[in-house]
Image (tube, helix red, strand yellow):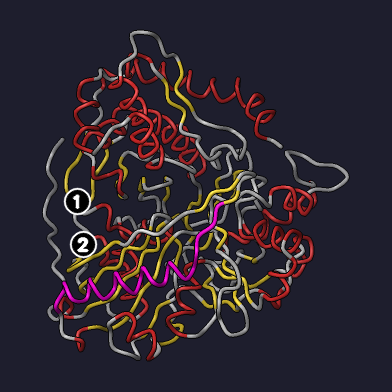
């Protein structure tokens, strides 16, 4: 592990005086921050919100609770920052992606939000993408059109907004009929801020009904809408990334504690903002994110799809760019689950237990598929577990195996992403809550065999990214300046002596999935 170099490209004079209110709506609750024009987080607050899980794959949250938590967090952050109201120049939102909020003509939510974890629409989406003949679940003609047009296709697990909307149409027709517009969670936030219902090219991408071949002029595709069964009149109008979609209303300003009339930038999903908040804005500059879920991504100069690994490039939050899209359903959530199950009280105890166990955790393997998986396999029925336990297995082995299991899953995904990009990523910028742990940074370096750069304040990468995207939209920051505005904290090099041990565990990790997926399908497919 080595320390980072300090940035040598200072921000222009006066840029630090500007401030942006940045909102990151995570699954656990929103973070709201006041971020200066030179990328410094002056103050931030987190307020938790509830999550309701149901048998059959349901996962919902209350949009009203989101907004109440955001306004509470905003007032606290603004008060803590202590900046003059005149320093605020705009608002930027990011948050959980691939969810659905149904709103009526007045902009009020008519039902709980269906979030990215929800798979209740998997049967409906399979009917939409299937046909008399299917290959890997898709009618070949439909799959070809979807891939050529969007760069991807609706996931068979039913966790995309397309599946959410079809589920509401089929199972809750009263909600469907009352809905004027179906919105991504972040676009719902912009509606609450400005009164305008719209989506950007990047936020709409997970609906898989837009023609993304010309990244500067994305539009809905009539054929894909027809095949999907979606009603265009119930979908939002589209705006380019980097747009100013409106201004903060008087009511929202009072609730948030900021001046009315502030420009509001087009919203982005957490995947899109994290890469900007990590500073990895150049093509093929990779980043690793671990929060509730996880991913490995980078900007790329092409639209492409890997059906076999469920990796695709989609419109980025930076105008005219594409971004690699993939996801692990649970990562940080696995550690939270294990702490609860094993009676671990805090992260200091986690660190002590990890230190007490040897690398490789006595060959205990943890598979982190607690809510199914998306990439490099799209499988909503697979589940996680501890494997190769014995009477000599310790509590420390179990806890360390969770960190290693998530890293082994990252290695599986990294292999798919590198093949997709046609190059090896020697370095990954690490952000998200998981990156706060030096031990998890080192575990990832050792398991992946790659240099891991722990970014400063990694848990704030999304709010920082949302703020930087807003500053770009406002014309106050150029994209090429972003890397100089994001600091690194430490660098972790892989321990070559551990490579054989992790190579062995990785091979068995992948074998476990291949040998047990049928069991999970039979147990959970109903």
Query: Where 493 falls versus 163 (above or below)?
Result: above
Residue sitting at the far top: 391
Most foreground residue, 29 or 16: 29
Q: Residues within 10 Å of mark 2 (few under 14, many from 20)?
A: some
Label annotation for residue 488: 1
Query: Where 218 falls versus 262 (above or below)?
Result: above
Most foreground residue, 461 or 417: 461
> Does 453 appear in magenta?
no
The quadrant the N terminus occupies is top left
Residue depth check, mark 2 versus mark 1: number of the one nearer the observer? 1
What secondary structure is the magenta-colored segment mainly? helix
Q: Secondary structure at mark 2?
A: helix
Residue that carries the numbered disc 2 in the rendered image: 484
Q: Which residues are magenta?
A: 59-82
Image location (x, y in percent) of residue 151 = 61, 55
Looking at the image, residue 343 sits to the left or right of residue 406; the answer is: left
Res 342 → quadrant: top left
Q: Residue at x 44, y 66 (%)?
A: 268
Image location (x, y in percent) of residue 396 = 27, 22
């Amino acid at each position: 592990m080595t320390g980072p170099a300090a940035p040598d490209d200072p921000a222009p004079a006066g840029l630090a005086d500007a401030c942006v209110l940045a909102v990151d709506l995570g699954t656990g609750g929103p973070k709201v921050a006041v971020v200066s024009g030179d990328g410094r987080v002056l103050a931030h607050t987190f307020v938790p919100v509830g999550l309701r899980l149901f048998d059959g794959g349901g996962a919902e949250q209350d949009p009203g609770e989101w907004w109440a938590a955001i306004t509470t967090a905003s007032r606290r952050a603004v008060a803590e920052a202590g900046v003059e109201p005149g320093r605020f120049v705009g608002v930027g939102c990011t948050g959980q992606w691939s969810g659905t909020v149904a709103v009526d003509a007045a902009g009020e939510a008519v039902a709980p939000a269906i979030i990215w974890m929800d798979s209740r629409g998997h049967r409906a989406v399979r009917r939409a993408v299937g046909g008399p003949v299917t290959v890997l679940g898709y009618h070949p003609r439909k799959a070809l059109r979807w891939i050529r047009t969007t760069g991807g296709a609706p996931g068979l697990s039913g966790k995309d907004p397309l599946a959410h909307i079809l589920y509401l149409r089929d199972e809750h027709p009263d909600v469907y009929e009352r809905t004027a517009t179906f919105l991504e969670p972040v676009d719902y936030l912009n509606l609450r801020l400005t009164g305008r219902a719209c989506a950007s090219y990047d936020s709409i991408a997970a609906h898989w009904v837009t023609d993304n071949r010309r990244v500067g002029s994305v539009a809905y595709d009539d054929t894909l809408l027809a095949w999907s069964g979606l009603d265009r009149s119930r979908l939002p109008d589209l705006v380019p990334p980097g747009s100013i979609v409106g201004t903060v209303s008087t009511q929202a300003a009072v609730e948030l504690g900021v001046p009315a009339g502030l420009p509001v930038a087009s919203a982005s999903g957490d995947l899109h903002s994290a890469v900007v908040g990590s500073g990895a804005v150049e093509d093929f500059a990779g980043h690793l994110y671990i929060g509730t879920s996880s991913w490995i991504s980078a900007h790329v100069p092409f639209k492409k799809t890997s059906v076999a690994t469920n990796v695709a490039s989609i419109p980025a939050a930076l105008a005219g760019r594409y971004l690699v899209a993939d996801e692990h359903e649970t990562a940080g959530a696995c550690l939270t689950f294990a702490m609860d199950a094993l009676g671990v009280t805090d992260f200091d105890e986690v660190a002590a237990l990890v230190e007490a166990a040897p690398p490789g955790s006595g060959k205990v393997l943890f598979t982190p598929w607690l809510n199914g998986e998306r990439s490099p396999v799209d499988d909503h029925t697979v589940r996680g577990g501890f494997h190769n336990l014995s009477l000599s297995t310790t509590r420390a082995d179990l806890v360390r195996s969770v960190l290693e299991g998530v890293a082994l899953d990252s290695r599986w995904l990294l292999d798919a992403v590198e093949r997709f990009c046609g190059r090896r990523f020697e370095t990954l910028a690490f952000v998200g809550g998981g990156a706060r742990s030096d031990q998890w940074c080192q575990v990832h370096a050792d398991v992946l065999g790659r240099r891991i750069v722990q970014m400063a304040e990694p848990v704030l990468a999304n709010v920082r990214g949302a703020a930087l995207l807003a500053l770009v939209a406002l014309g106050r920051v150029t994209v090429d300046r972003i890397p100089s505005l994001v600091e690194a904290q430490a660098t972790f090099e892989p321990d070559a002596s551990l490579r054989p041990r992790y190579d062995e565990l990785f091979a068995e990790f992948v074998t476990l999935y291949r040998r047990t997926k049928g069991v999970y399908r039979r147990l959970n497919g109903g």
